[in-house]
Amino acid sequence: MKSLEQILSECEETAFDLNFKLAKKWKSEEATRVIVGYLPTYIPREIIHAANGISVGIMGTGDRKQIIKGDAYYQSYICHLPRGIIEMALDTNLDGFDGFLFPAICDCVRNLSGMFKLSKKGQFQRYFDYPQNFESSIGGKFYIQELEKVLDDIFKINGVRVTAKALNHSIGLYNVNRQLIEKIYDIRQTSPWKLSAVEMYHILRAGQCMPVEEHNEILEQVFTHLQNERGEPMDNIRVVVSGSFCEQPPIGLIKSIELAGCYIVDDDFMLGSRFIQGDIKNNSEDPLHALSEAYIHQSTFSSSYYDVGNPKGKRLVKLARERQSDGIIFCAASFCDPALLDRPELQKEADAAGIPHINFQFHENTGQFKIIKEQAGTFSDSIKLWA
Ligand code: SF4
């Protein structure tokens, strides 16, 4: 077994490899393998795995790439994520990718899917729509049709027809993946000093660009290491971070929140990996139906998910309580309409529940964190002194 430090260092490297070397190497080892890139937040990665593919999360460039062409494609008053992604597409970063999925979340992502189509990136570029109706016979049926379109896209490339057995196997692997991630989050709830939020972030982000089998091994090993003591408890408050489900905050920002005296006991940074809560049925004769039922009934709350009858504000409060959180940090990308439109409603629920909160906005390439650290530090001190 590798040491925890070695695992963490490898995960950090993979998480920010904007050339996706691991995935490209995996593809090069077999003729029918395909790479399907996807944007935040969620796609059912199981279907790609079952079709002999690897799903690769394209989570943005952060501060690791200079954006020139991306700025020419977009107006100034939108978030940063799509600029970085178009820059990667126009450079060579995404060469070797066979197709791209753009989960429906906002107009920026919708436009990006059109740009990929016009630039002929990959062999398919699909804007992946989600049901807004949560009845199995209506929204569920629609969702299955969307899944079938993706399977068809991949079939046209590699000729692999997905069987129920293969899909059940893939669902089983992702069930293990989700279970292990939640087990590690639970350890971080009871002993957050054992693994920092930045370290957890690297582990999850790396998992979006490697085969799930390898990621499961990494998670197993991390879980085993965390049975031992590591680090020292600090006099920190406990916070839930909400609003960073799409464009990712810079690592410096997450670090600043932690250094300012806050344990991040839950977050929505790599939400796609945790979107479905609990296991998906993996012994079904109709696994596409099982995936669809899971989306309809087991999705987490998010601005990317229509929350009819199950308000996200109440779910955020419930999460904060379950994690015994002292406060909530609303931390969204600048100009992120979905996150910023939801925020007043979420804040209202936090107020009603008596949970203190603060908010920041960021760009993925923000470089100055002094003000954020001061704000988070003041938040932490005020809770310690007066809450
Ligand atoms: S960060 Fe927000 S506005 Fe930007 S692409 Fe993502 S969801 Fe859309």
Image (cartoon, rainbow, N blue to C red):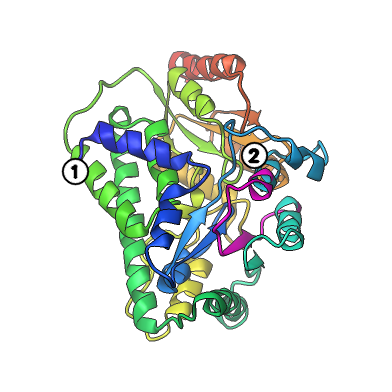
Q: Which mark is residue 224?
A: 1
Q: Looking at the picture, how far across and down is residue 48, in whole percent?
A: 47, 68
Q: Amino acid at mark 2?
A: Lys
Q: Nearer the viewer, residue 29 or 219?
A: 29
- 160 in the magenta segment: no
Q: Quadrant of residue 233?
A: top left
> 111 or 68: which is nearer to us?
68
Magenta stretch: give its range: 87-107
Counting every numbered tag in the picture gives 2
Residue 284 x/y as whole percent = 36, 82
Eyeballing the image, is 292 above or below 250? Answer: below
Q: Secondary structure at mark 1?
A: helix
Q: Position of residue 323 (x, y in %)?
A: 39, 39
Above or below, 130 against 304 in this view is below
Residue, disc 2: 348
Q: CA distance from mark 1 to mark 2?
A: 40 Å
